Amino acid sequence: MLEKAADFIKHSDPKETTVVYHGGCGDGIAAASIMLKTFQKLFGEMPKVKFASPGVVAKLNLHSKTIIFVDLAVDQEKDFLLNLAKNSRILILDHHQMQNNMNDLGILHINPDMFSKIPGVRYPGAKLTYDTCSLIADTSDMDWIAAIGLVHDVGAEYWKPFLDSVFAKYKELGKVTYEYKGKIGKLVSIITAGQELKHGNEIALKVLLEAERPSDILDEKVPEVSELVDLDKAREEEITYYVDSWEKLADIDRKLKLAIYDVELKHKISSALSTVLSKAHPEYLFVIMNQESPAVLKLNFRQTLSKVDCAWLAKESTKPFGGSGGGHKPAAGGRIHPKYKEKFKEKLKELLKK
Ligand SMILES: [Mn+2]
């Protein structure tokens, strides 16, 4: 399976190739940098590069002879791909839940669920790209970038020997961990800190392309990294403030074990904040609400122990207000119009009492 993808890359012309990656995502940016560095090694130059999210990828104007999608669930857009395939050769390297197996329609599509025992969601795009590129180039100097994808997408537990080798090789990463913490966690949060900047994806990708090892980023040796590091610090400070003051600021129902936390965030940290809080207080259900724009109240639901089905709650609590919600049992998200804030709170408590 991976051999086919490797062969595809080997027969590409960088001048006529565009790599499209999942923007705003640490794994996607890592995957793109591995692909670009591999092109550099094979051909002495890099292809063009674009980013997208699954929702907007079909709006991209792509005209290259060769198009490579990494860490992007582009198989959701079957017609877009079929149309693109009329004039381009296409490779998809992705690990999200498959919607369409594009191989059936003549497009080279690689997803770990086709060949690996490791669940696809835990076989991140960066590792998939790394493993593919390893078949045609010496990628040993990019192993730490694959590790960024593994930690970002919570797949590290499945790749312990690989991560052990990365930690052994790069002493600056300190003590081994398979979680989003320590120096490797710092690396991941710096790479993703730019998501609220206009050119955040480009900056993060440039940083990964220029860095030769983790210390180049951690010690700010690459010039562009300082902007990301400053932003990462500011984000962390804001998370710390809200984590430390939740008992003072949140609307807490001790009987229902519910904490509704109405926050006013400067940075896009509501998801991270809710995860941190619910891990620290696993008995509670946290519902973080943050007004993102005049018409959007963003909601994050977390119940670490799955005592409440957050996906169900997110869906049912937003439905009466024309909003939307969904996700997984321990973690979900949603949105409503801010004018329904108080009614939403009532609905939430009513649903929980059931
Ligand atoms: Mn991913």
Image: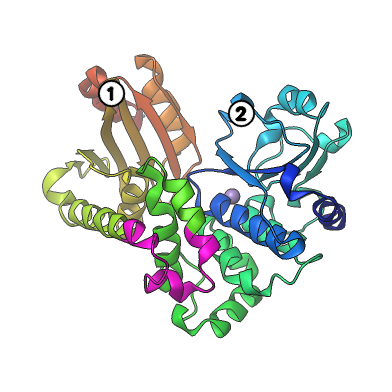
* Chief secondary structure of the magenta portion: helix
Element under disc 1: helix
Query: Could you say where residue 167 lies in the image, as x and y percent from the top left?
Result: 54, 80
In this rendered view, identify the residue nearer to me: 157 or 226: 226
Q: Quadrant of the C terminus?
A: top left
- Label at residue 55: none
Q: Which residue is mark 2?
A: 60
- Whether label 1 touches label 2, CB < 8 Å: no
Query: Could you say where residue 202 lies in the image, as x and y percent from the top left?
Result: 48, 48
| Badge 1 amino acid | Phe
Q: How far separated are the C-alphas under marks 1 and 2?
A: 37 Å
| Badge 2 amino acid | Leu
In this rendered view, identify the residue nearer to me: 135 or 240: 135
Q: Which residues are magenta?
A: 207-229
Magenta-span inclusion, residue 138 = no
Query: Could you say where residue 103 lies in the image, as x and y percent from the top left?
Result: 85, 38
Q: Which residue is mark 1?
A: 344
Q: Is residue 248 above or below residue 209?
A: above
Q: Is residue 269 above or below residue 212?
A: above
Q: Is residue 85 above or below residue 253?
A: above
Few, some or many residues within 10 Å of mark 1 (<14, 14–19, 20+): some
User: Is residue 282 at all visible to an observer of this figure?
Assistant: no
Q: Is residue 299 above or below residue 155?
A: above
Q: Of marks 1 and 2, which one's residue comes earlier in the chain?
A: 2
Q: Which corner quadrant of the image does residue 145 belong to? A: bottom right
Residue at figure coordinates x 33%, y 62% from the top left = 226
Marks 1, 2: nearer the viewer: 2
Left-right relation of 177 to 86: left
Magenta-span inclusion, residue 227 = yes
